[in-house]
């Protein structure tokens, strides 16, 4: 089943002069697929991921997710879509340092307003268990190691059961051992929970283990 379709995406930057950063990008992604976007620095990976994340709406072409056409929706509609259907994991975890692990994971679900506080807490424990961090739930997040914080960030991204999880260099700040742990969590999420993972990565070992690699060069897809 298709969960994402990007059709004929073009994107331009206008500073310092007009320059086409994405050139006629088209591809589809299926449910449960674990995908990496790779390519040399500057080829347009982050720009594409930012469009897929629905944060950047200044592009040509059509973006669809979960059978919904997202191109043309208002910022409020896109924010609601993101909160319900998308999860994000970045190179830097962006946890709130003074909050506990549990509070950090609960926040996006409290914001969504779909579950009672008790249900949200139960779900947060479930997601923390999945990343093997349930034993640290009541610790202040700033007291954890970098690898542990990234696992908490993954639990937070999973709290609303997103269809698609997007990662921008999710292992970029981790050592080899923690990168492997994060890779295996993603693989489990994709293959057992059938959630789709789309990551931008420079880590060749990470990319090699994915179900599929989309390779970009100079704003185009050269291998998919
Ligand atoms: N806001 C912007 N204004 C103008 N040019 C930009 C802007 N953002 C990115 N660029 C340029 O667009 C191109 C693609 O950038 P992008 O960050 O998407 O590449 P990338 O493949 O993700 O690179 P990296 O692997 O280094 O993160 C680069 O030439 C970059 O300098």
Image: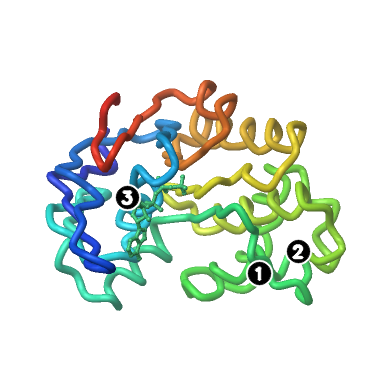
> Which residue is painted at 35% across and 35% down in the image?
31
What is the C-alpha distance between the residues marked 3 and 2? 31 Å
Q: Which residue is mark 2?
A: 101
Q: Quadrant of ligand 1?
A: bottom left
Q: Is residue 156 above or below residue 175?
A: below
Viewer-closest of 38 and 57: 38
First in sequence: mark 3 or mark 2? 3
Give the total of numbered labels: 3
Q: Residues within 10 Å of mark 3 (few under 14, many from 20)?
A: many
Question: Residue 190 at x, y = what percent?
Answer: 49, 33
Ligand 1 within 8 Å of disc 3? The answer is yes
Q: Position of residue 181 (x, y in %)?
A: 71, 34
Closer to us: mark 1 or mark 3? 3
Q: Residue at x 22, y 65 (%)?
A: 17
Q: Residues within 10 Å of mark 2 (few under 14, many from 20)?
A: many
For marks 2 and 1, give the one nearer the viewer.
2
Instruction: Please provide percent x and percent y for residue 202.
Output: 53, 36
Is ligand 1 within 8 Å of the beta carbon of the residue shown at mark 1?
A: no
Label 1 – label 3 distance at C-alpha: 38 Å
Per the image, the residue denoted by label 3 is 48
Left or right of 154? Residue 73 is left
Q: Are marks 1 and 3 in contact (CB under 8 Å)?
A: no
Does 121 sit left or right of 187 as displayed? right
- What numbered label is drawn on residue 118? 1
Q: Residue at x 79, y 65 (%)?
A: 141
Classify 10 Å Cα crowding around label 1: few (below 14), some (14-19), many (20 and above).
few
Q: N-terminal of the two: label 2 or label 1? A: 2
């Amino acid at each position: 089943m298709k969960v994402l379709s990007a059709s004929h995406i073009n994107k331009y930057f206008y500073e310092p002069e007009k320059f086409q950063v994405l050139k006629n990008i088209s591809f589809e992604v299926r449910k449960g697929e674990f995908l990496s976007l790779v390519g040399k620095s500057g080829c347009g990976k982050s720009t594409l991921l930012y469009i897929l994340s629905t944060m950047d709406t200044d592009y040509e072409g059509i973006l669809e997710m979960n059978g919904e056409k997202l191109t043309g929706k208002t910022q409020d509609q896109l924010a609601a879509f993101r909160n319900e259907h998308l999860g994000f994991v970045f190179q830097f975890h962006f946890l709130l340092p003074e909050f506990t692990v549990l509070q950090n994971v609960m926040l996006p679900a409290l914001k969504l307003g779909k579950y009672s506080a008790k249900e949200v807490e139960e779900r947060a424990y479930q997601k923390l268990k999945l990343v093997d961090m349930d034993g640290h739930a009541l610790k202040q997040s700033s007291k954890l190691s970098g690898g542990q914080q990234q696992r908490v960030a993954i639990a937070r991204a999973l709290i609303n059961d997103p269809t698609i999880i997007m990662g921008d260099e999710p292992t970029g700040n981790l050592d080899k051992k923690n990168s492997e742990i994060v890779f295996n969590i993603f693989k489990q999420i994709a293959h057992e929970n059938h959630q789709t993972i789309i990551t931008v990565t420079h880590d060749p070992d990470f990319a090699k283990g994915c179900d599929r690699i989309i390779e970009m060069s100079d704003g185009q897809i050269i291998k998919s």
